[in-house]
Image: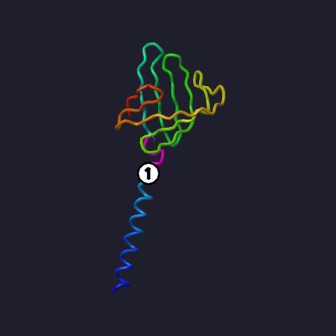
Amino acid sequence: MKNTIKLFGIIAFIAVIGFSLLACSKANSSGELDGTKWFHENAALGNMELSFNNGKYESVNLFFKSGDSGSYKVEGNNVTITKTHDLKDGKSTSNRGISVTGTLEGENTLIIMGMTFTKTQ
């Protein structure tokens, strides 16, 4: 009887660990933003559009037709984007290694470097 209780205790403990790991792997993935587009309105500096897909991001200043691209990673509510290319007229102009971290506030708001982006897709 004691062995049966120990066995069920071990099984329950392993199940808790397994579910914890599963929950953490989702929170640390980039899939939460896959296929989404975000918009930041700025009359003075030009409106910005930010899109995320398969661990890659692209930002475009709609007025200057410039922007950048690179990779992104989501950890909880934090989104870290790492710029790898500057873009001008849709063409890559140089490589960079700059990273910035933004914050997801709810499902429809992303704040990066003081700029508020609203989810459009």
- Residues in magenta? 24-33
Question: For the point 41% across and 20% down, which residue is it?
Answer: 41
Q: Is residue 30 magenta?
A: yes
Of all residues, the one furthest to the right in this rendering is 94
The residue that disc 1 covers is 26
103 in relation to 90, above or below: below
The local secondary structure at tag 1 comes to helix
Q: Is 83 on the left-hand or right-hand side of 104?
A: right
Q: Residue 85 appears at what percent x and percent y?
A: 61, 30
- Amino acid on which the number 1 mark rests in the picture: Lys
Q: Is residue 59 left or right of residue 10?
A: right
Identity of the residue drawn at 42% across and 14% down? 43
Q: Which quadrant holds residue 32? A: top left
Q: Is residue 2 above or below residue 89?
A: below
Q: Residue at the spot x=42%, y=69% of the render?
A: 14
What residue lies at 63% left-to-right and 28% top-to-bottom?
A: 92
Q: Is residue 94 above or below residue 7?
A: above
What secondary structure characterizes most of the magenta part? loop
On the image, the x and y values in percent for residue 61 come to 50, 21
Image x and y of residue 66, in percent: 55, 21
Q: Position of residue 4 (x, y in %)?
A: 35, 83
Q: Quadrant of residue 98?
A: top right
Circle 1 packing at 10 Å, graded few (<14), some (14-19), many (20+), is some
Name the side, left or right, on which 2 lies relative to 102.
left
